[in-house]
Image (cartoon, rainbow, N blue to C red):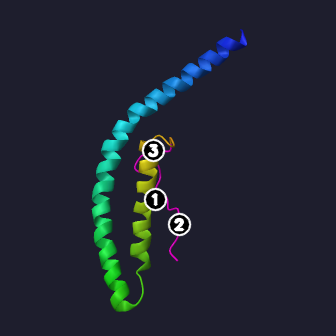
Amino acid sequence: MPKGVVKSEGIKKKAYSERKEAWFRIIVLIISGIILHFWGALVCVLGVINWFIAIFANMRNKEIAEFCEYWNTEKYKFIRYLTSVTNERPFPFSSMERFSRFE
């Protein structure tokens, strides 16, 4: 089989998978978008609570900060995925992760 034919088939497969991934972004937009929207509202409330804790207790709450960091990471992954920077899907289509740690 000539090399050009194999290469052409490989390009078609990649184009098909990219097209399929582009359509899947609509599903991710709806499902992850809803989850991240409500989770983001909770993170805003927790951020204010953690701010008050820091003012009155003179220290931040580590658990609240770490919970909020999960949202930060997943929101970042969500935006990168929707703008086609990466094909790594955000939560709930992949496992949750944190990019940074509490300091």
The mark found on residue 81 in the picture is 3
Main SS, magenta residues: loop
Question: Mark 2 and 1 residues: CB-CB less than 8 Å, in contact?
Answer: yes
Q: Is residue 86 above or below residue 14?
A: below
Q: Which residue in the protein does label 1 denote? A: 73
Q: CA distance from mark 3 to mark 1?
A: 12 Å
- Examine the structure image and report whether residue 94 is included in the region drawn in magenta: yes
Q: Which residue in the protein does label 2 denote? A: 100
Q: Secondary structure at mark 3?
A: helix
| Residue 96 in the image, given as x and y percentages of width and height | 46, 56
Neighbour tally class for label 1: few under 14, some 14-19, many 20 plus, Cα within 10 Å: some
Left or right of 61? Residue 86 is: right
Q: Residue at x 47, y 52 (%)?
A: 95
Mark 2 or 1, nearer chain start: 1
Mark 2 or 3, nearer chain start: 3
| Residue 64 in the image, given as x and y percentages of width and height | 39, 74
Neighbour tally class for label 3: few under 14, some 14-19, many 20 plus, Cα within 10 Å: some
Neighbour tally class for label 2: few under 14, some 14-19, many 20 plus, Cα within 10 Å: few
| Residue 52 in the image, given as x and y percentages of width and height | 31, 83
Q: Is residue 86 above or below residue 23?
A: below
The mark found on residue 49 in the picture is none
Q: Quadrant of the N terminus?
A: top right
